[in-house]
Amino acid sequence: MVRITKTLAVLSIAAALPAAGFAQDASKLDRAGITVGTLGNPFFKPLIQGAEDGLKTGNPNVEITSVGADYELNKQASQIDSFIGAGAKIIMLNAVDVVAIKPFVEKAKAAGIIVAAMDVSAEGSDLTVMTNNTQAGNIACEELAKRLNGKGDVVIINGPPVSSIIDRVTGCKDAFSKYPDIKVLSDNQDGKGSREGGLAVMQSLLTRFPKIDAVFGANDPTAIGAELAAKQLNRNEMIIAGVDGSPDFLAGMKQPDSLLVASASQDPYGMAKQAAEAAVKMLETGKAPDPQVTLLDTTLVTKENVGDQTGWPIPSN
């Protein structure tokens, strides 16, 4: 009986070892997924790079899959399902729809995955790091208003229904509302967050309105597309602002004949890296970050201060 008891004791300890090892490995980041609105917007290149570098603080050999959802909710939901099936421990999420993404976020969390929102909010996410987009839209449109001496006809080219775009347009409208002699001719046209979309919307607006004094694009690609449309029709009476501080926008502002005058500059690399590092820390400690939402203010880049700036620096490893 003694021998049997000892044998059972040894077997009991041996059976416990894999469980203990599993518990230790639970906090080790071996797989992660990144899904962003679209890979077609150059903004997402440094955003993805920042997320990848931040995730590597948990394990330099972590297996990372990065994908774009083309601003399609069903596609992003399918990507989240794939991350769940692959055993990801962290999902870095740039949501295409702040509200509708919630059930898919909750599904990932139910599978034990940490979901970190970056650049835009996502209902149900464990943490969020994003630009203070209300502030970004506000300072860009305040700059337009000042350059117009508080008077003129303006248009706002909107974008996809993500929190960043919604907040920027809100901030812009708040800035314009302080000037009773500024009239907003249009604010509900979707430029798709792209150069092509901004071009198409602006072409339509130019045919509707014989005079446009200023344009706010919800992001830099939209604003650049608007400038292309204006130049195609020899409509040079306007000034244009955006949000991003992208390399293309900054280069455009440096051109002597440019209509681009200002952009509220973001730091996509730093934003995503901070979000990923917070997610890794949560995985390791089991504690949610405080505060749960971090907002990062933007700085205004104008034709006068653009100088040698190139936009969106990515630190070399």
Image (cartoon, helix red, strand yellow):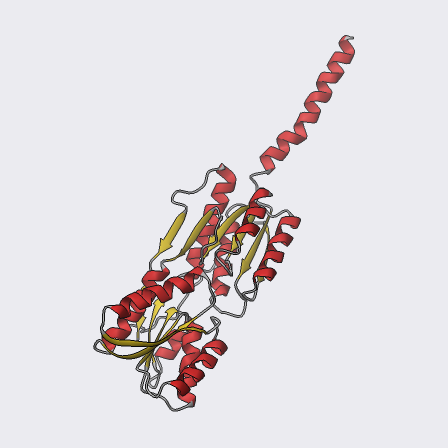
Answer with left or right where residue 89 lies relative to residue 214. right
| Figure quadrant of residue 29 | top right
- Vertical relation: 93 (above or below) 248: above
User: How many marks can you see?
Assistant: 0
Residue at 45 percent of width and 41 percent of height: 288
Residue that extends furthest to the bottom in the rendered view of this protein: 234
Which image quadrant: the N terminus? top right
Tell me residue 175's x, y (percent): 27, 67
Q: Nearer the viewer, residue 135 or 316?
A: 135
- 130 sits left or right of 153 in the view: right
Q: Is residue 151 left or right of residue 296?
A: left
Residue at position x 53%, y 55% in the image:
101
* Closer to us: 167 or 260: 167
Most extreme residue toward the top is 1
Compared with 19, 191 (above or below) is below
Quadrant of the image occupied by residue 27: top right
Query: Which percent across, then down, holds residue 37?
Result: 52, 63
In this orientation, which residue lies closer to the viewer: 164 or 5?
164
Say whether residue 146 is visible: yes
Residue 12: horizontal and vertical position, in percent?
70, 21
Residue occupying the point 36% across, 54% down: 295
